[in-house]
Amino acid sequence: MKKLVISLLLSLVLIAGSQVGYLRAESPPVSKVNQTYSCPDKDHIKLEEKAKELGITVDELKAKMKAEHQTRLEEKAKELGITVDELKAKMKAERQTKLEEKAKELGITVDELKAKMKAERQTRLEEKAKELGITVDELKAKMKAGE
């Protein structure tokens, strides 16, 4: 049970990391909708609502969020006395270390862990696509388009 919980948490962290990027510093209020950045259904409505609240378009909100993210990266890098690229490399190395630790804990290789996570993501995509009555490819296209 403990391994399952840890596996799920790791999956969520890695998925969130890949969608949100290198977010480590505190987020300003607008960035809270960053979690809905590419969601194809009800969560995207939140993004649209937030944009409407601010009196801007969804694309402008996304650009604003991206700029805020870059600003947080720059601030964090400055605090640490390194460049943004060095910060990104450091965070990537930390994620790799966590992957290696998790794989070791589960008694599998990093490649096996990544394959497992990829399979779990595919399963979630298939479930979501089925729920929406569309194909996985259509779901991916919607996600990419930010719908």
Image (tube, rainbow, N blue to C red):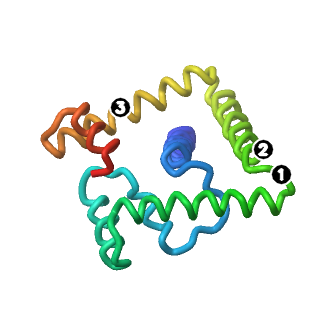
Within-10-Å neighbours for mark 1: few <14, some 14–19, many 20+: few
Residue 48 % position (x, y): 29, 66
Q: CA distance from mark 2 to mark 1?
A: 6 Å
Q: Residue at x 55, y 61 (%)?
A: 67
Q: Comparing marks 1 and 3, which lies closer to the viewer?
A: 1
Whether residue 54 is situated above or below residue 144 in the rendered picture: below
- Dot placed on the residue nearer the N-terminal end, 2 or 3: 2
Secondary element at image label 2: helix
Question: From where the camera sits, is residue 1 visible?
Answer: no
Give the labeled residue for mark 2. 86
Q: Inspect the image, locate mark 3, and give the three-letter code of the amino acid beneath it.
A: Gln
Q: Inspect the image, locate mark 1, and give the three-letter code of the amino acid beneath it.
A: Ile
Question: From where the camera sits, is residue 39 visible?
Answer: yes
Give the labeled residue for mark 1. 82
Residue 145 % position (x, y): 31, 45
Residue 83 % position (x, y): 79, 50
Q: Residue at x 30, y 37 (%)?
A: 140
